[in-house]
Image: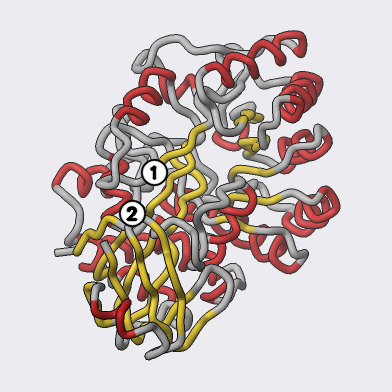
Amino acid sequence: MSMVISDVRVFDGEEVLPRADVLIEDDRIAQVAAPGALPPATLARAARIDGAGRTLLPGLIDAHTHAFDGSLAQALRFGVTTELDMFAMPGNVARLRRAAADTVADVRTAQVGATAPEGHPIQIMGELYGPFDMVADPDQAEGFVQARLDGGADYLKIVIDDGSSGGASLPCLTPAAVAALVEAGHAAGLTTIAHVATAHDTAVALDAGIDGLAHLPSDGHGERIAALAASYGVFVVGTLSFTEAITGTEGRELWRDERVWGQLDDQTRAAATADISGFPVDPDGIANALETAAALHRFGVPLLAGTDANDGPHGGFLALHGASIHRELVLLTKAGLSPVQALAAATSVPARHFALRDRGRIAPGLRADLVLVDGDPTTDITATRSIVEVWRRGTRHIRP
């Protein structure tokens, strides 16, 4: 099937084209042309979609989620066409892969993340999910990585968190175990990403040769962390929206926006407004995280948009699949990124760092993963919430 989105502003993942016609052929982007430049024969056989006053974006990529049954359909509704899952039990991964369809967001996964016995996130997962592999010493690293490969992992997640940021005391991977895991992951051809919660965790991950960091330390030291991260050449998935959700109140503006709230069902609204007062947090967490994000940006460290959306059986965590990426974009601009840079953080930048070579940009030959919005998010980042249509591999979803 052929479709032409005509006379539309295009953010192609890197640059803004003020006006263009974009031709979709089946599941691919076929052409990006100046208005009126497509051949009449092409236009005659294509359905026409008016893009005047609208902006076409690559499908959004949430670079940190925890996917569950139903979450991928919600993600697609909000323009997230790809989720990067950062910790999933093998049974859940198998279900998600079987359910893969153009009616839900695509998913990549770390499968089970590496953590110490009884380490994070066991205190959250409890008995809900059953036992999973852990790493007691460096000698177990190679076997752990092989098990992840056998389970279909796309990258390796390593958890470095002793619980101190939340006032707890948990077992944690030793620096030697972290280094062994990174070495084994790289030998297997996997990108490695570390969950960190403090400046100390970050230093351990960087010294081990990690490729990327998940989360921004909430205990300050932004300039020092940024300088270190830049010197090691890593990327960072900030999950600012999650930090804000559990430490501040400003993020509630997302739920007051009818463009978002009106697309949530009752169960998801309950998760969005759940009482997590018992969750131990640093009240300065979001301020520290924004300061660190700003420093990372000044030092030229790539920032990737990720939400830690994980509204699963363990309860609401206030970061929701699909919806929260639109708050993440706002927070990235608060950290000093321009709207165009924030959009890149949710499209071409994660595609590049996670080797998703067929998406993240609007260019001929790539997947037709696209989002059409009213207005201009390259100047007003909240316009990403004004979704008109979403395409996943060329399959068109018109938003009610």
Q: Secondary structure at mark 1?
A: strand
Query: In front: 121, or 66?
Result: 66
Query: For the point 42% across and 69% down, which residue is it?
Result: 57
Q: Secondary structure at mark 2?
A: strand
Query: In front: 230, or 294?
Result: 230
Q: Name the spot of residue 121 as percent of width and height, x first.
A: 50, 25
Instruction: Examine the rendering and report whether any part of residue 323 can be seen.
Output: no
Q: Quadrant of residue 337?
A: bottom right
Above/below status of 194 relative to 177: below
**Which residue is most to the bottom?**
36
Above/below status of 199 relative to 7: above
Residue 392's mark?
2
Q: Name the spot of residue 367 as percent of width and height, x first.
A: 44, 56
Image quadrant for the N terminus?
bottom left
- Disc 2 crowd rating (10 Å Cα; few below 14, some 14-19, many 20+) is many
Residue bearing mark 1: 106
In the image, 202: left or right of 345? right
In the image, 80: left or right of 286? left
Query: For the point 80% across and 36% down, which residue is it?
Result: 209
Amino acid type indicated by mark 1: Asp
Q: Name the spot of residue 36 as percent of width and height, x first.
A: 37, 90
Q: Name the spot of residue 332 as percent of width and height, x first.
A: 54, 65
Mark 1 to mark 2: distance in Å? Answer: 8 Å
Query: In front: 74, or 34?
Result: 34
Query: For the point 72% across and 41% down, which residue is it?
Result: 211
Discs 1, 2 touching: Cβ within 8 Å:
yes
Query: For the point 45% across and 9% down, which residue is it?
Result: 131
Instruction: Examine the rendering and report whether any part of residue 194 can be seen.
Output: yes
Amino acid type indicated by mark 2: Arg
Sooner in the amino-acid sequence: mark 1 or mark 2? 1
Residue 286's mark?
none
Image quadrant for the C terminus?
bottom left
